[in-house]
Amino acid sequence: MSDPLADLTPAQHAAVTHTQGPLLVIAGAGSGKTRVITRRVAHLLRTGVQPHHVLAITFTNKAAQEMRERIAELTGGAKVWVSTFHAFCARTLRRYAEQLGFPRSFTIVDNADQRTAVHEALLETKHDPKQYGIPRVLQQIGRYKDMLLSPDQARAEACTPFEHVAVDAYAYYQDLLTQNAALDFGDLLHKTVTLLEDEDTRDSLSTRHRYLLIDEYQDTNHAQYKVTQLLAQSHRNICATGDPNQAIYGWRGADIRNILEFERDYPEAKVVHLEENFRSTQTILDAANGLIAHNTERREHTLRCTQGEGDPIVLQACDSERQEASWVAERIQGRLRSGVPRSEIGVFYRTNALSRALEVELIRRGLPFEVIGATPFYQRKEIKDLLSYLRLVHNPNDDLAAIRVLNVPPRGLGKTSLGRLKTYARERDLSLVAAAREAPAEATRGRARKGLAAFCALLDELREEAEAELVAPVLRAIVRGTSYYDYLAKEYPEEEDRALNVESLIGGARDWDVASHDARLRALAARAGEALPELFRSVANAGPGGEEEGWGLGGFLEHAALVAERADDGAPDEERLSLMTVHAAKGLEFDSVFVLGLEEGLFPHSRSTDDPTGLEEERRLAYVAITRAKRRLHLSYARWRAWHGRSSSQEPSLFLYELPQEAFPAGASLRDLQRAGGARRSVHDAFDGVDEPPEEPYWQRPLGAPLQAAGATRSAPAPASPPRMCFPPLTPLPARKPDAPVATALKSGDRVYHEQFGPGEVLDVRGEQLRTRARVKFRDHGTKDLVLQYARLTKRAP
DNA sequence: GAAGCCTTATTTTTT
DNA sequence: ATAAGGCTTC
């Protein structure tokens, strides 16, 4: 084990060595936050803290995995519990379920189940699902849960008609979940808080988890905040790390006040600021700082650079997403040729749907890649079907799973039969499976009766198969008993990968079984370990996250619900480049970063730009994306993109205008690309095939050269001939949204030139940013009021 | 009463 | 493009 205190800056050292009492680390992007956390854990262990007394909580599975690895690396494999909030809660609730009045075998419902439940709830409460929108209602319910409001409490707060509908649905939805012994993601937190409110339980859990580390504290919502607060209440050993500039989970109820008010909650807290950036080049940092400066809500701190200036940012305008994909792939190959390993290349986009075009292109070129987070393996139909059967075996009360598979493959149980069965079940307070077993005459006839009987027989058979607590044999029995492959072949004749997915699921289950078996042996050894020497005990403790529970069928289902990630197949991670959403990229870093789809409506996303808070969060998101890059940053947008299956015209993202223009090569900023009217061939093509700048860095701004004067580039004449375009035809982009220098550079008295009105003089300038207007007195055309955003005004030397 | 076809609306981000 | 919902047919 190397020295955890070696090579630390004074600030980092202070954070690492502050082991007792509350600690808040405000850590800018790339300031070595992960380093501080992992070193701090190592240091804690070195001072005699037991590994199982340390609990580190992260936001995403990816981050948890990475941190687990780095801690293991640093401490020689000490078993510290590192997990997401939800995984931690799930594991804890398993242990205390009965105390809270629900079975240990509770299921965790996913988004699709939630929607089913909301749909049922709306129908049952006599509201029209269409009118109110299932996603909206579901989001509202989620918000109530994040705020720890019960249906009754929520009802007291409800004001608008929509809120009343949502509350009605919430109440019914919650009953539905309870009846199904099911918890949703919000419940995991909510119930854990309930658990921690009991003094004895809290004491024992606080004793167990004596040292808390909470990463990305700026993104905790109220429920998560409450969990940490209750856990830390007695020992106060809580280390929170975060960066207000990277708060990107407002939509999930994250409350930035949690980090801003940490010092109020823990007055004795030590606060450490990390503002030196060890990750990115000066150019990249300037871009990030320049962008985030447009936010009015932000914590004043600017990252200081410790690296050299570095290469300029590469911006590429593309005609289509196809072309964008091809450009990115080409650039990636260039980086690989320059010796950058694949694992050091990250491609980000705002929404998952955007990965498709690039995936196709990467496959075409034979570049191995991994789509992180997305391609929700566990959300595929065939996987969900099989998992639903598995859930029914594990928990026969799981009506949501029953609804899904009662008629899959078709057993002659249509809407009517299902409706009858539901009514029958509800009247007698039975689960659907229990009702099916009674096979009442009023609910079944003919085909349906036979189908139900077959279904029940299958479940019995599966139950027997599950006695051994192994997952793979049960899955095989399901596939066999339902003739699932026949069903797939009939239903989806062209889609052979579905069968492969099933194989892959079974393969994953087999691995799980092996690991379970291993863990059980270790757990046995651990139990006997009281009498064993310390060394042996620490080996015996090694289980998932340091816990001995969570294996077998139940554990597998929990894993599937919480870690929606497919088991590894093919090339190891180091051999692949990564594609992910910007959200998933938080906390990671890459030598070279590509950000796709920088278009208005996409990034910033149209669904979040109607209110200013939303736009600011989008900007922070862009900030996160940029600051992931160590050395190279590539941005791109497409002028045409498939949307709803139809190609539609796109505008460059507002953020491209807000980035400091000097971060780009001269002549290759957004305005230059636009002025070129959409020419595909840009100066960047000078790098083609080599991906290294020519020997003379002609694209660098001459030393001391001023920023481009306001509007100076606008005076250049339009290209003589319209650029050649392939489909779809290009319309010249209107000169919208000038960047800040244009808007602010004009003042009264300036002499200007207008393409149509000729020379004139500015009388006065009003408004700011995009709404800046200038009153101009033209020599030949009188006085006009012009919006600078649209008027192509050129400033002339006096 | 169920299966199949055609319509329609729908697309953030994560656990 | 895709999926869910509604309508028509068997």
Image (cartoon, coloured by chain):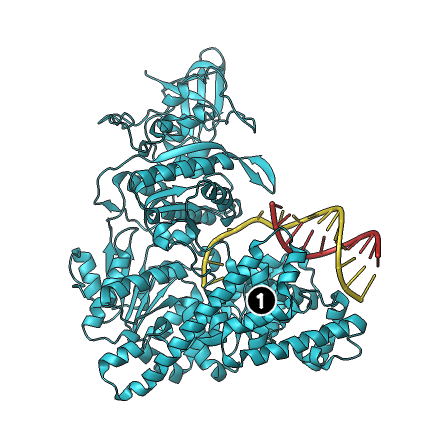
Chain colours: A cyan, B yellow, C red
Q: How far from the left and from the top, in percent, is residue A624? A: 37, 48
Q: Position of residue A74 (x, y in %)?
A: 23, 64
Q: Is residue A164 visible?
A: no
- Residue A675, by quadrant, is top left
Q: Nearer the viewer, residue A244 or A406?
A: A406
Which SS class for mark 1?
A: helix
- Crowdedness of circle 1 by 10 Å Cα count: few (<14), some, many (20+)? many
| Number of numbered discs overlaid on the protein picture | 1
Q: Position of residue A373 (x, y in %)?
A: 45, 56
Question: What x and y, as percent, mark residue A520?
Answer: 39, 79
A575, A730: nearer the viewer? A575
Kindly identify the residue that appears in the image at 51 percent across and 64 percent down: A505
Three-letter code, disc 1: Leu
Q: Which chain is indicated by disc 1?
A: A
Q: Is residue A524 above or below residue A574?
A: below
Q: Quadrant of the N terminus of chain A?
A: bottom left
- The residue most toward the top is A780
Q: Residue at x 21, y 63 (%)?
A: A16
Residue under the point 73% across and 72% down: A451
Front residue of A31 and A291: A31
Residue A20 falls left or right of residue A652: left
Instruction: Please indicate, yes or no, whether residue A183 appears anywhere in the rendered image.
Output: yes
Quadrant into which the C terminus of chain A falls? top left
The quadrant in which residue A445 appears is: bottom right
Instruction: Give the residue pinned by disc 1.
Output: A386
A757 with respect to A228 (left or right): right
